[in-house]
Image (tube, rainbow, N blue to C red):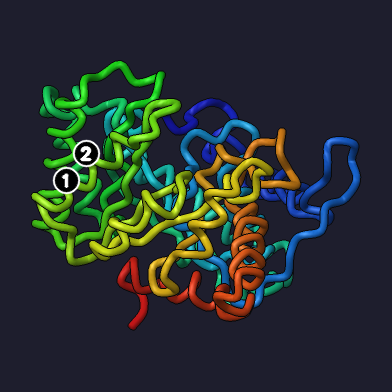
Amino acid sequence: MAFDTSSDSVREIDQSQRIEQLLEHLQAPLFTAKKGKPVEVPTPLAPLADTHGHLTPLRHMHPAVAVARAALVGVRLLAVPVDPADDVPDVPAFLSWFDEVLHTATELLASNGDTPHCPEPLPHNTFFLAGVHPYGAQRFMEDPAVRARLLALLDHALCKGVGEFGLDYGPWNKLPADVQIAAFREHLRIAHERNLPVELHIRDADGDAHAQAHVDALRVLREEGVPAAGCDLHCYTSGPDVMTPFVELGCHVAFGGAVTFARSEDIRVAAAACPANKILCETDSPYMTPVPLRGQRCEPAMVAFSAAHVARVREEAGVATQAQTYADLWNNALRFFGMGD
């Protein structure tokens, strides 16, 4: 779905009027349950990073508001994936839109006053990744314009990675596996050439105990090589057995809202088992809303709930203190995107 260019977009409202209208969305409480009861946001024990939060498909919230709200709960790094086959048909228009989103978010934070837990304004650490989702694999392989848009996005200074791309064998993707695998290989080769980290979308078919999409992805990574800059299994929703060979190859694993779901014990076991230097956190906004906000549309600020849950899971498993997990999530994100030691 393309980024919003409708009358509600960031360019359509007079600047002073726009800020006044949007500021109301930053007032406490930021979150409420279905019946309007305020939901307390966990206080982070380190800066928060949403390593995969979409802004282009947001329809329930102005994207600048989403960035500002994330800053208010302690998010200081936001990686925004974009897809040149789907939501970026015009690269210059997207870049202008993205710049305006960050500019407006900065103004909102300045007008709102203090930003708790966020000594550095989040918009300064908001950037994008570019890659073709498996749904668009055939277009990527057959349409030179899609590849050209991808390369143009990767050329930009605010682009810090390739993704999301990968393999989706779920019921909504009708493309054959060989087409998806070919696009997967091409993306990996581009990442190798540019020394960029990658974020992978890997989804198995429903009920597939063999985890064939993960099996195929692992084979391709072994044949093409894991990019030296890093590789992340975005939105991880499997157990520790599927995860282990990927971390042995050096991949990171990002846990999002699914780790909070009642029936996700296997994901929580994987979160506890993930090596401390490979664990990440994300939202996959506007999808995968974490407990206790299920039923609402997700936004980057909600990474606060997923990070808190991961930290509790790892402490209860005797793996690390909550403070250590928070520190790991933050420092791993910085290193993954080339922003830390």
76 or 324: nearer the eye?
324
Circle number at residue 341: none
Q: Are marks 2 and 1 in contact (CB under 8 Å)?
A: yes
Q: In the image, residue 270 lies at what x, y percent?
A: 48, 57
- The three-letter code of the residue at mark 1 reads Arg
Does residue 308 appear in the picture of this structure? yes
Q: Quadrant of the N terminus?
A: top left
What secondary structure is found at the residue carrying circle 2? helix
Q: Is residue 251 left or right of residue 206?
A: left
Q: Quadrant of the C terminus?
A: bottom left
Residue farthest along the top direction in this orientation: 174
Circle number at residue 219: 1
What secondary structure is found at the residue carrying circle 1? helix
304 or 113: nearer the eye?
304
- The three-letter code of the residue at mark 2 reads Asp
Does residue 1 appear in the picture of this structure? no
* Disc 2: CA contacts within 10 A as few (<14), some (14-19) or many (>=20): some
260 or 6: nearer the eye?
260
Mark pair 2, 1: CA separation: 5 Å
217 or 112: nearer the eye?
217
Q: Residue at x 64, y 52 (%)?
A: 302
**Residue denoted by label 2:** 216
Q: Residue at x 30, y 61 (%)?
A: 251
Tell me how many marks there are. 2
Q: Is residue 130 left or right of residue 188?
A: right
Q: Residue at x 12, y 49 (%)?
A: 190
**Quarter assignment of residue 180:** top left
Q: In the image, residue 299 lies at what x, y percent?
A: 61, 46
Q: In the image, residue 51 lies at what x, y percent?
A: 45, 57
**Depicted 218 relative to depicted 335: above or below:** above
Q: In the image, residue 38 lies at what x, y percent?
A: 87, 50
